[in-house]
Image (cartoon, helix red, strand yellow):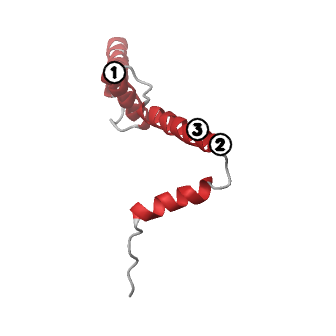
Amino acid sequence: MTATLCLPICIYHPVMWWERTQVQSPAEVLALRASALEENATRAGAALGCSYANSGEYEAELISARRAAGAYGPNLGARRIQVAAIAAGLLAVVLLVLLLS
């Protein structure tokens, strides 16, 4: 098994840059460097961008997304109201049957 050695960076990058810029004029080289700098700055700015103003907004959005996905289980408050309504209806029917008999 052969191992690949690391490229000698101190030699590799200047040679590649020199070969890349040989067919261009000095003005084009400067424009290329400036555009590369602008691209790097744009990418860095996009990486740091955030759509939330603070951590509270992020947490609220995260919780609502998890709740919508069902991570916290069913809404028990609505279930309790349904059970109470059914129990009250059954009680009313039982009382009505007892009063009419």
Find out whether the residues at labels 2 and 3 contact each other: C-beta distance under 8 Å.
Answer: no
Q: In the rendered structure, which amino acid carries the disc numbered 2?
A: Glu
Q: Which residue position is annotated with label 2?
A: 28
Q: In the rendered structure, which amino acid carries the disc numbered 3?
A: Ser
Residue that appears at 39% across and 37% down: 70
Q: Outermost residue, front direction?
A: 26
- Give how far apart the Cα atoms at labels 3 and 1 are: 33 Å
The mark nearer the N terminus, 2 or 1, is 2
Point out the frontmost of discs 3 and 1: 3
Q: Which residue position is annotated with label 1?
A: 54
Q: Position of residue 58 (x, y in %)?
A: 36, 26
Q: Position of residue 53 (x, y in %)?
A: 38, 19
Q: Position of residue 25 (x, y in %)?
A: 67, 46
**Element type where label 2 sits in the image:** helix
Choose top left, top right, bottom left or bottom right for residue 34. top right
Answer above or below: position of 2 versus 69.
Answer: below
Label 3 environment density (alpha carbons within 10 Å; few <14, some 14–19, many ≥20): few
Quadrant that contains the C terminus: top left
Quadrant that contains the N terminus: bottom left
Q: Is residue 71 or residue 61 the one in the foreground?
A: 61
Q: Outermost residue, top direction?
A: 99
Q: Which residue position is annotated with label 3?
A: 35
- Give how far apart the Cα atoms at labels 2 and 1 are: 43 Å
Q: Is residue 66 or residue 90 the one in the foreground?
A: 66
Answer above or below: position of 48 versus 20.
Answer: above
Q: Position of residue 74 (x, y in %)?
A: 36, 33
Point out the frontmost of discs 2 and 1: 2
Label 2 environment density (alpha carbons within 10 Å; few <14, some 14–19, many ≥20): few
- Give how far apart the Cα atoms at labels 2 and 3 are: 10 Å
Q: In the rendered structure, which amino acid carries the disc numbered 1?
A: Asn
**Element type where label 3 sits in the image:** helix
Q: Is residue 101 or residue 49 the one in the foreground?
A: 49
